[in-house]
Amino acid sequence: MPTYIVSAAANRLTQQVKQRIASHITESHSDATGAQGFFAQVIFQDIAEGNHFLGGSPLKADHIFVHGYIRAGRTLDQKRRLLESIVSVIVEAAATENRYVWAYISELPPSQMIEYGNVLPEPGHETEWLDSLSTEDKAYLLSVG
C-alpha cells in the first residue's frame, strides 16, 4: 500500500484541506499506477513551531512536505506524473506556491511488504491479489475505496 506522509506546520492545513489532499493524492496514485484506491493511505503530521529547520536555521516559509512510500516497479513516467500531480494538488488545496511543496517517492519491493495479512503483489497484479483474499478481507477493502 502506498503511504503518503504529508508534513506541515501545526494548524497550517484545515480538516477540509486535509480531506481534499487525501482524496486527490489517492486519485493521483490510482491514475498514475492503475492501482485501486484502497491501496493508498495518507497520513498528516503537524510540525510544532521550532521543530523544523532548513539549512540549519528555523524554517521561515510555508513548506509542505510529502513523502510517499510506494511499491517498486513503476515506470519513470508513472513516478514523474505522480509527483507532479501531488504537487499540483497540494498547491491548489493549500493555496500555496510550487516552491513551497517538496515531494519525494521511496520505493519498496512488494515482497518486503505485508498488508491486510498478505504479501503485496507486484504492480499490475492487484486484481489477482484481491481475488486471492478471504471474502471478509476482500469485502473490507472494497468498502474502503
Image: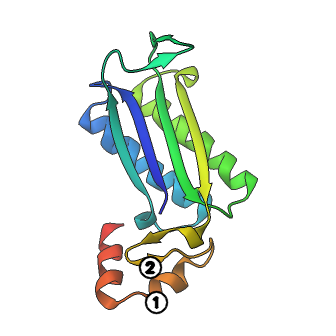
* Residue drawn where x is 53% and y is 28% of the image: 101
Q: What's the CA distance linking mark 2 and mark 1?
A: 10 Å
Q: Pick whichever, 36 or 6, lies toward us.
A: 6
Instruction: Find numbered disc 2 in the image and state the secondary structure of the residue it sits on.
Output: strand
Which is nearer the N-term, disc 2 or disc 1? 2
Residue 129's place in the image compared with 51, above or below, is below
Residue hosting label 1: 132
Residue hosting label 2: 118
Q: Pick whichever, 110 or 17, lies toward us.
A: 110
Image position, residue 131 (x, y; %): 46, 88
Q: Which mark is residue 43?
A: none
Image position, residue 10 (x, y; %): 29, 25
Q: Is residue 6 left or right of residue 120?
A: left
Q: Quadrant of residue 137?
A: bottom left
Mark 2 vs mark 1, foreground winner is 2
Label total for image: 2
Q: Is residue 32 left or right of residue 24?
A: right
